[in-house]
């Protein structure tokens, strides 16, 4: 169960943007994605983006590792095997 909070995700994202501005950093909102991690379940939940203008995704690549919202490693393993296959053929 999520913690009870009175701060919306939009307010928290605004706080992060303000922090970045004060620290002379820029957040590229066109490249910013939202991923919600959840337990694997047979039933698919339909979720809507929590922050306007930010795309909600099922997976994200971070430092070469593919993270999936259901904690599965299937996409990452498939990706690594395809790279190995390509380099082995070369």
Image: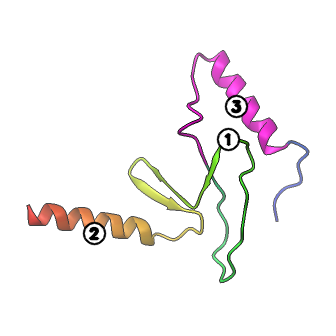
Q: What are the residue bounds of the magenta stretch?
A: 8-33
Q: Is residue 61 left or right of residue 19?
A: left
Q: For the point 12% across and 65% down, which residue is it?
A: 88
Residue picked out by circle 3: 16
Q: Is residue 24 magenta?
A: yes
Q: Which quarter of the image is occupied by the N terminus? A: bottom right
Q: Could you say which disc has been placed on residue 81 in the image? A: 2
Q: For the point 72% across and 68% down, which residue is it?
A: 46
**Looking at this view, is 32 or 64 the one in front?**
32
Q: Is residue 80 magenta?
A: no
**What sort of colour scheme is used for the picture?**
rainbow
- Answer yes or no: do the residues labelled 3 and 1 have beta carbons within 8 Å? no
| Residue 25 picture quarter | top right
Q: Which quarter of the image is occupied by the C terminus? A: bottom left
> What is the C-alpha distance between the residues marked 3 and 1?
15 Å
> What is the C-alpha distance between the residues marked 2 and 3?
37 Å
| Residue 21 picture quarter | top right
The earlier-in-sequence mark between 1 and 2 is 1
Total marks shown come to: 3
The earlier-in-sequence mark between 3 and 1 is 3
Q: For the point 69% across and 81% down, which residue is it?
A: 43
Q: Could you say which disc has been placed on residue 40 in the image? A: none
Give the image location of residue 50, x and y in percent.
75, 49
Tag 3: Cα neighbours inside 10 Å, few (<14), some, or many (≥20)?
few
Q: For the point 42% across and 55% down, which residue is it?
A: 65
Q: Regarding mark 3 in the picture, which secondary structure is present there?
A: helix
Give the image location of residue 27, x and y in percent.
58, 29
Give the image location of residue 28, x and y in percent.
55, 31
Residue 71 vs 22, above or below: the answer is below
Q: Could you say which disc has been placed on residue 53 in the image? A: 1
Residue 35 vs 71, above or below: the answer is above
């Amino acid at each position: 169960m999520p913690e009870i909070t009175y701060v919306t995700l939009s307010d928290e994202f605004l706080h992060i943007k303000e922090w970045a501005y004060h620290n002379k950093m820029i957040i590229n909102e066109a490249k910013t994605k939202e991923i919600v991690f959840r337990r694997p379940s047979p039933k698919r939940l339909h979720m809507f983006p929590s922050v306007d203008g930010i795309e909600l995704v099922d997976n994200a690549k971070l430092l070469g590792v593919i993270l999936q919202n259901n904690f599965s490693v299937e996409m990452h393993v498939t990706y690594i095997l395809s790279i190995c296959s390509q380099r082995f053929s070369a």
